[in-house]
Image (tube, coloured by chain):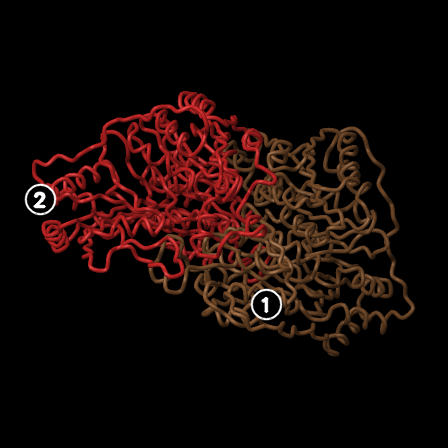
Chain colours: A brown, B red
Amino acid sequence: MSEQMTGAESLVRSLTASGVEVCFTNPGTSEMHMVAAIDKVEGLRPVLGLFEGVVTGAADGYARMTGKPACTLLHLGPGMANGIANLHNASRAHVPIVNIVGDHATFHAKLDAPLASDIAGYARPFSSWLKTATSAATLAQDGAAAVAAARTPPGGIATLIVPADCAWEEARDVAAPLPVPERSAVSETALSAVAEALRSARKPAILMTGEALTARGLAAAGRLAEAFNAKLYCDTFNTRIQRGAGRVLVHGLPYFGEMALEELSKVDKLILVETKAPVAFFAYPNKPSTFAPPDCEIVTLAAPGEDALGALEALADDLAPGVTAETMALALPDVPGGALNADSLGRIFAHFLPENAIVSDEGITAGMAAAIYCAFTRPHDWLQLTGGAIGDGLPMGAGAAVACPERKVVCLQGDGSAMYTVQALWTQAREALDVTTVILANGTYDVLKIEFDRVGVGAPGPKALSMTEIGAPDLNWVQLATGMGVQGFKATTAEEFAKVFAACMKEKGPHLIEAVIPGM
Amino acid sequence: MSEQMTGAESLVRSLTASGVEVCFTNPGTSEMHMVAAIDKVEGLRPVLGLFEGVVTGAADGYARMTGKPACTLLHLGPGMANGIANLHNASRAHVPIVNIVGDHATFHAKLDAPLASDIAGYARPFSSWLKTATSAATLAQDGAAAVAAARTPPGGIATLIVPADCAWEEARDVAAPLPVPERSAVSETALSAVAEALRSARKPAILMTGEALTARGLAAAGRLAEAFNAKLYCDTFNTRIQRGAGRVLVHGLPYFGEMALEELSKVDKLILVETKAPVAFFAYPNKPSTFAPPDCEIVTLAAPGEDALGALEALADDLAPGVTAETMALALPDVPGGALNADSLGRIFAHFLPENAIVSDEGITAGMAAAIYCAFTRPHDWLQLTGGAIGDGLPMGAGAAVACPERKVVCLQGDGSAMYTVQALWTQAREALDVTTVILANGTYDVLKIEFDRVGVGAPGPKALSMTEIGAPDLNWVQLATGMGVQGFKATTAEEFAKVFAACMKEKGPHLIEAVIPGM
């Protein structure tokens, strides 16, 4: 193609040529030529979020389920900054995202207009690739380079800052996709070291994240576990775990350090797959920050972005020929009646979760039981809060639903964290996404009460409680959902929750269930 | 005092000793010792926001009305990042804020736990003072220094990053307040240059922001305006303007460049007070980015942070002795009936706005009429979106209400921008703040439709419209408000709006009115 077009159009055509199909966005004036180009060009679907945290979290969820980048279109520094928390989560998830961030025209920048800011400064911490475009003529190549950078294993956040005049001036070219490197093979040295560690261990364990947590990766790891009596762990928070019946069970390392230390206390050889030696989520006075025993030998099989799948399968073929991995049998919990609490909710959740569902888990304390029970339910995908920045759950669910319109998405969502990006409900409604949001409505930041105790400052007084409780006034989730076009239900007993959750699992479209459970 | 205490307690005591009275916050685990210290120490009132954009926007509003800093307490990089947009607005407003941002313990930082990030990198663009604490023993001094830095004229954002171990280890000292520099006097040279410019001008104009927009500053400027037939302008977006009957009228420079150019086209001498020569909010193809005519002489009276009040009064005494400034007479618009639209709403708004009200104006396009009519109503304060990052209006209103509990606060708020930090409604309810929020519910980002046309890309197609309209589904503001504990009303006619707005102006406490008006 060499027709005259705007830089924006050349960028949009180059992004689509490189396989980008969805643009999550909340644009502003400096992005209007990009909006016009998306309007004109076939093949890039815009999805509006009413806040940028929704936009970036949705891009995270989309990438987790497709393995490929959506683009975002964001409005200068402050608009992008509104999306930083979920870009932080996405960068910790090692997923590909291409951010297109509008900026003032190059000739306007020196005037320091009110919205001017150091966009690159804000973007640097979360970006694995960062560029400010310098001309319309080179935008096409910039776009192709951004996609290739985002897709470079293990995946990362590529941020392209586009001054408005680069978008509106003339361009001639559309860039062809750039080659994306394959995952590099794990070295023979690493394979041998792991083989030796497994053979010599009294109590081996394999700690994994990334591609090892696909059904295929877990199947290979499961053969090694069987052959060497090794326990399989994954990080506390992972990008995506394929769980449920027919799959190999992997144990999440406990969030609470005391439990993690106990769990690993006897391990003498710890194999790492796309992760690092386990560290505490937070530090605490007089408690250790690392969890592996001092005399435990730690051996890395694959660094993030290396071919962990190939390495696990090669090891299993070498060391466990003919061994079959133990997989989970379907064992649905009974549906309890009576009080609705984290446990009864978890049983019901697992009982009715349909095959091939996607769970976006930001359940924090109140979601832990559901996570455990779901190990025994129908096969499904489980997405977690990789970077610890709350407010990813609802947007991630929306993005996953855009990626997989034929699958049921369920958000298992704490009430406190849900409020961070509550605007995601509107995008669910706008796009008629098949998402059921379960709000674990306990009216408190329970985790903070636990942490208040764990950091050793005694019992919270009234002012501390006012900073850890979100009742007074209580949030009415049915009204919040309905106010954004999502049908809402409230459940206060196990029977009520079972009835409405079962119904939502059968009916397509966005629904929200306010599950009223006790807090601490 | 030299009792043993934690670093956090020494910091909180030092902040209160330096005059900090309110802490807007959403804390996390790494801030628990700060929470415990706030719990223990008298004199620092915690105000919880359910999202950090609320926290920082409220600190902005509080500072605009008190002239002194609140502190925020924020959770590591992502928590602070959620508040960047409103810190950008606050930095453009030159208001004082002290951010306390928790971080991992110093010994934990190297482990790169999931929530670790480059906090200083994220904070640098908006901070006028930035420090990472290095010990519990020095936190007290850090706190005093942060307050002094924030208060240094014209006011700025001081960000203190507090590793968790600095907060929990022992400290002995409370820091005394540090001296804060006075605003520096305007030089005789500048005063003479301005005097000469005024005397020699055919068509002089004075463009102001900052302290010049107080009633006192405007009174002095008004005497000069009278003596020299000068027109008084303020920036398009200002920190705070004292407006209404009995005050000197100041004309906001139009947002749209065509209008600003026309407005200034005949001006031959432009005096700047705490601002710079006017520039376009955005650049557009083939349109100028600066508004002063090429042959206009531009003379600066006061740079930001200089003693603009003193300079204006000195000039008025020298150059306009005995001259009286023209002030606005009270001229309440009639209360119209019939269709509710931006104009009829604006008349009703001005008619019923009570004396001494504070208006947080994020009305964008639909609020412009109200702003004009209010020039003729009872005296009031008007707060604007200084940095152009939408989502400041509701939080700013909450912060202003915390600052001035005896005054009526009214948020004049576009629906699209309201959704950015809609969680502010909950804080209004939690704190029983006397805020009436008027949602200008036109269901579109109208400004984007105007800008789509102004950037010259033709008529928007369906995909472009999907990125500029926020109906489908319509937001139900009464449900959103009620869901967060704020009483909500809906008005679809001028009569309905007049009735409910008048009632809200008389009744204390948080209310929201969804004013349904036509969009483009």
> In the rendered image, which quarter contains the C terminus of chain A?
top right
Dot 1 crowding, Cα within 10 Å, few <14, some 14–19, many 20+: many
**Mark 1 secondary-structure assignment:** helix
In front of the other: A487 or A41: A41
In front of the other: A198 or B505: B505
> In the rendered image, which quarter contains the N terminus of chain A?
bottom right
- Is residue B146 visible in the rendered structure shown here? no
Tell which tag, 1 or 2, sits nearer the viewer. 1
* The disc label shown at residue B268, or none: none
Q: In screen coordinates, is A491 left or right of B434? A: right
- Is residue B242 visible in the rendered structure shown here? yes
- Could you say where residue A24 lies in the image, as x and y percent from the top left? 59, 54
- Could you say where residue A174 lies in the image, as x and y percent from the top left? 57, 71
In front of the other: B134 or B247: B247
- Could you say where residue B329 lies in the image, as x and y percent from the top left? 23, 28
How many badges with numbers are in the image? Answer: 2
Residue B95, compared with residue B133, is above or below; it is above
- The disc numbered 2 marks a residue on which chain? B
Which residue corresponds to the image point at 21% horizontal and 40% vertical from the top-left? B217
**Mark 2 secondary-structure assignment:** helix
Q: In screen coordinates, is B167 left or right of A480? A: left
Going by the numbered disc 1, the residue's amino acid type is: Ser
Going by the numbered disc 2, the residue's amino acid type is: Leu
* The disc label shown at residue B319, or none: 2
Which residue corresponds to the image point at 69% horizontal and 71% vertical from the top-left? A306
- The disc numbered 1 marks a residue on which chain? A
Q: Pointer 1: what residue?
A: A14
- Could you say where residue A443 lies in the image, as x and y percent from the top left? 61, 34
- How far separated are the C-alphas under marks 1 and 2? 63 Å
**Circles 1 and 2 in contact, beta carbons < 8 Å:** no
The answer to whether tags 1 and 2 share a subunit is no
Dot 2 crowding, Cα within 10 Å, few <14, some 14–19, many 20+: some
